[in-house]
Amino acid sequence: ATTGAKSDAGAAKKEVRKVKVAFDQGGKPIGYLDEKGNPTGYEIEVMKLVDKALPEYEFEYVPTSSEDLLVGVQQGKYQVGVKNAWFTEERTKSYIFPKEFLGLSGVGILLKKKNENIKDLSDFAKAKLSLAPIAASNAQYTIVDEYNQANPENKVKLEAGDAFSVDVVQWVNEGRVDGGIYLGATYEKQVLAKDGPYHNLANDLVYNEFAVVKTWPLFNKKEQEFADAYDHAIKKIKEEKKTNKLMVKFYNTDLFKLLDTVKR
Amino acid sequence: MQTYFDSAYIWGALPQLLSFLHVTFMVAGLSVLFGTILGFILAVMKLGTSKASIKIANGYTTILRCTPSIVLLFLVYYGLPAIASNFGTDLNHLDTSIYVVITFSLQFGAIMSEVMRTAYEAIDRGQYEAAVSVGLSPAQAFRRIVLPQASVVALPNFGNSLLELMKEGSLAYTIGLVDIMGKASLIISNNYNSHSLEIYLALSLIYWVLSILIEQFFSKLEKIFSKGKLVIKTT
Amino acid sequence: MSVGLDVPFLVKTFFVALSGVPIALLITIVSLLIALPSGFLLALSRINRIPVISQLARVYVSFVRGTPVIVQIFIIFTSAPLLLAPIFEKYHVKTSIYDINPIWYAFIVFSLNTTAILIEVFRSAISTVSKGQLEAAYSVGLNNVQAFRRILIPQILVVALPNICTATVNLIKATSLGYALSLREITLKTQVAANAGYHFIEAYIDIFLVYLILCSLVETLFKLYEKRLRKFKAAAA
Amino acid sequence: MLEIKNIHKSFGKNEILKGVDLQIDRGDVVVILGPSGSGKTTLLRCINFLERADQGQAIFGDIHVNLKSATKKQIHQIRQRIAFVFQNYNLFTNKTVLENVTEGLIIGRKVPKADANELGQQALAKVGLADKLNSYPSELSGGQQQRVGIARAIALNPDIILFDEPTSALDPELVGEVLTVMKNIAKEGTTMLVVTHEMSFAKDVANRVIFMDGGVIVEENSPKEIFSRPKEERTQHFLRRVIPEDFIYNI
Amino acid sequence: MLEIKNIHKSFGKNEILKGVDLQIDRGDVVVILGPSGSGKTTLLRCINFLERADQGQAIFGDIHVNLKSATKKQIHQIRQRIAFVFQNYNLFTNKTVLENVTEGLIIGRKVPKADANELGQQALAKVGLADKLNSYPSELSGGQQQRVGIARAIALNPDIILFDEPTSALDPELVGEVLTVMKNIAKEGTTMLVVTHEMSFAKDVANRVIFMDGGVIVEENSPKEIFSRPKEERTQHFLRRVIPEDFIYNI
Ligand SMILES: Nc1ncnc2c1ncn2[C@@H]1O[C@H](COP(=O)(O)OP(=O)(O)OP(=O)(O)O)[C@@H](O)[C@H]1O
Ligand SMILES: Nc1ncnc2c1ncn2[C@@H]1O[C@H](COP(=O)(O)OP(=O)(O)OP(=O)(O)O)[C@@H](O)[C@H]1O
Ligand SMILES: [Mg+2]
Ligand SMILES: [Mg+2]
């Protein structure tokens, strides 16, 4: 956005403001560093479009961990962070969620072929199957937790763990667990894609999506003005369907088609 | 096992990991350097006669030793710029590696101060006395006579702490600094979390070789310093 | 840094963090119970250059000390079942390999690691005790075990204790890696509590406080013990 | 009671003991004389297995052992019957004076603690240290440490005591006292092998004197013979330099 | 050359030195006698600041110091002129015999290495250890270690040497030799303060003998006077027990 910086009427020529956009560098295909070390991924590419649309801002992308991203945005070290973040009421205490969401994320259950008929969490709970541990700092944990609170009579056994040590695909296929909460985007790239590292398991596994969820950038509490600018820009980008194209590119599907079914 | 294991990933990962080795070296090297200096100062304070210095040094050691690394890292990473901004300096653009080095140095110093204190105290006081009696200054007596003997005692523990520090890459990764450990995580996530076993095996291989080299170096040093020493042998 | 801290959450979660202490302590104690004697014996084997054992000890130390604990956890947690499952099947072992409580993995990994660290701690401490002490003990008719227990170990411990203390404190902190095994220890419990609202700053403060309290207590115990053991040395100073 | 045959011991290329034979009977008091570095300490250490000899036999009462290949059990048995007074004291630094003396009794010999304390106090009283029971070795003067070492050995009431220059750190007044103590325990029938430079002790108490030099026994005889009519030239030479003129006439 | 006034020193509640005065002139050889535990070692240690006295003054040539509050610089200056031979040797365990002797020369006195080695070898030759230059202390016998300690002190050619029982670990033959060495350096004009139990040394070499007991100087006189006509009862008592009958007549 260095080009064509406009000056507001009445004020002195406004300087281009540099802002830091933190992203979870281990979040392929949402946000990650490519072979050459450049930031890319669905959410990054959308943010790049936003940057272009906002001449008075210049974005700098800071690769970091999701822990640091959360602390850093809250503290103001980063003005905004993207990490496939979902909305919860409580989170609005610490961050500004803008009006416009950033992307969509499909969530489902990864299962062995023989459990194909399990379509959602309540089926899963009824069948008394075991679920792979979910990282404590992951919103998937919250989804299951919320389900459990809403359905106290039919709970899924939920265990916290770490994304780091849990290879859900392997665990499910191995039989260590019966199923795992999984992201559609990852499943597409990892198992369905011909060059995916677990393409050899494509016939043994199924992925049943039970929800599509909006993902949001998290703004620092003092950045209302920036958030508003973002809203303004993203609205147009979405209208131009540029987001759909990026989603196909990075996730292999266009979840925007399912937007009517999205509840949160 | 074959279903999940593909040794090609190991060989593929090795060169990628190795190209980040210099980051590991840089961070560990600087932290060891500064941490050792800090540890030395603290050890001197602990061994001195001033009650206040002893209290300060002990307190520092307790707090730094007991603080989880990740918390300390955040304290430095967020606290330092906050303090600096009170003095009108903006540190937010400082390289992340600097924060990592500061964090490790602070922690390494606390641990080294205990290593050095015990090593010093283990040396018979007669050695120091004899040295000053032949006209060495206390500093010379320390450097020439006590230090080499204390080093023998300190080296194994120093080695422990040094290797520990080298492996703290996951911590650096938390604030976005990528060393070989961090690179391993990146490779894994770029594979969508699959084949991590192979990547970690490659990582272990590199670490293992490093640790062997470092140990060889230390045992050479130990040999040099332990000239003339009789060790306990059971019969 | 204290802008916008959610104090009620902070307080509530402090107790959540506290409830993770027992499991952290359990892992620590079990690991120490295994590592202290084996570290000591292996240190002796290295000093006495006992063939085979001392070489094996070296290889073992270099690997365990050289590689990150979290990676070791990962390797053993991922591959042990894969390697063992066929064996279990072959010998018709009834229990499923996946039903093993993951805390066993923690016991194994942390005792192996602590042993490696303690080998070096003891090796350095043993070298400070004069050979004459052992000889004198023999000369009054003590056997090896008695000589070590009564004469050498108290002298060795004085030198080793501060470094054992460091190792213990590090071990307590390292039990947080148990999250990778889904062990419900301090860090994991706190992180889970923090997740829904992204209360990570509060979570870190709670984690910090709990570890600080826990480790300072442990450190104090060590200091007291060191003081008692040092009685004979203090006299000389 | 103790017979040693053909001990050899080298440190690296240096052969320190070159085939030493020794026979000690119950109640014997044998003094070893010899210049510094002649291997006296090494000989005592080999007898007590603090140093492994390269070659040699020992017969200790009913126990026959090869000094090179003795088993742990044999070594332990022999050590239970031998006490050692070290040239450089080697007191247990982490034990008080009394504990130093009682340690071997309580732990090694399983003597009840109260009895051991009693025995320990008696031994310490004999060497004039009844008032230092609860001091640590680091708080003692050199002479005091030496005396604790002696008390530690005599308290064990062993079959044989090996003394390595037990009076070297003592002042002459104490030397007299300690030698008196040693004389008394000799009279009680304790067998003793003593490396010392106290000619008067050799003269008055020993029933045999051995002169060592260069790792071999040069001469061995009754004190009277060896002091008045040394046979070997090296012995004559040594004695001439260390004994006052009038010493011999007093024998 | 060295004057000490009113040294007091306690360990805990135990008062070890209770006001000792001492005056030593250039070329003096002063011998301190006294029973074990009377504070002889402690006195030497206080003079060399290895122990901080609780009270007292020292005048060393042009340097006047308070023994309790001397500055680091003063201490260093004084130590540069004093050498110390320790009762328990205190050899540098990580240095060879020759390095033990040359360390103070090369580092403390800045003597060029070649010269220092030369001086070191001379000093070691004087104590009969020319062949052990490259051994480590742990490879030496007790007597050999003691002699290295002496060589280390004399190589420094200091204004004054403090000897703490320099011959206690030596065999009589060597005692004679070492005392000869000490006599020679005394003749060369080195001032010496010697704690020893060798009465013959006191008699032949000392120009003054001090008898200490219970932390005070009981009596001080020429050897002739003190051995033949001790004034104090405690001295008489001590000497009667430690000196052979005929000793006095030989004076
Ligand atoms: N561990 C060792 N390594 C190498 N040489 C040694 C060792 N121990 C002793 N020696 C050498 O062996 C020789 C004999 O030593 P030993 O201690 O037996 O002498 P000694 O007769 O007791 O002498 P002293 O009267 O001085 O105590 C000495 O020359 C000494 O240097
Ligand atoms: N560090 C210490 N702490 C407590 N008491 C001590 C200490 N050092 C020495 N003493 C005591 O001080 C007294 C004098 O000791 P010192 O070493 O001066 O005696 P000494 O005259 O040299 O005796 P010796 O002839 O036996 O060497 C002794 O009773 C000893 O127990
Ligand atoms: Mg000897
Ligand atoms: Mg003394």
Image: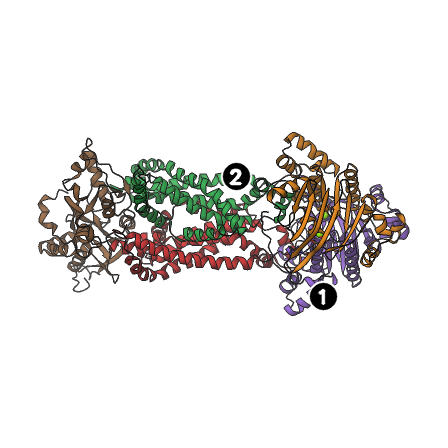
Chain colours: A brown, B red, C green, D orange, E purple
Tell me the SS state at disc 1.
Answer: helix
Q: Position of residue C157 (x, y in %)?
A: 54, 43
Q: Quadrant of ligand 2?
A: top right
Given residues A53 and C162, the one toward you in this image is: C162
The answer to whether tags 2 and 1 share a subunit is no
- Number of numbered discs on residues: 2
Disc 1 residue type? Gln
Q: Depth-wise, is mark 2 or mark 1 nearer the camera?
A: 1
Q: Position of residue C232 (x, y in %)?
A: 61, 41
Q: Which residue is mark 1?
A: E122
Tell me the SS state at disc 2.
Answer: helix
Label 2 marks a residue whose chain is C
Would you place residue A17 above or below residue C164 in this image?
Answer: below
Does any atom of ligand 1 lie closer than 8 Å to the CB of label 1? Answer: no
Locate residue C102: give its quadrant: top left
Q: Quadrant of the C terminus of chain C?
A: top right
Label at residue B85: none
Q: Which residue is mark 2?
A: C225
Disc 2 residue type? Tyr
Q: Are marks 2 and 1 in contact (CB under 8 Å)?
A: no
Given residues C139 and B68, the one toward you in this image is: C139
Q: Position of residue C57 (x, y in %)?
A: 47, 50
Given residues E57 and A80, the one toward you in this image is: A80
Give the side of residue A228 with respect to residue E20, left or right.
left
Can the viewer see residue A21? no
Does any atom of ligand 2 lie closer than 8 Å to the CB of label 2? Answer: no
Can the viewer see residue C50? yes
Give the side of residue D18 with respect to residue C39, left or right.
right
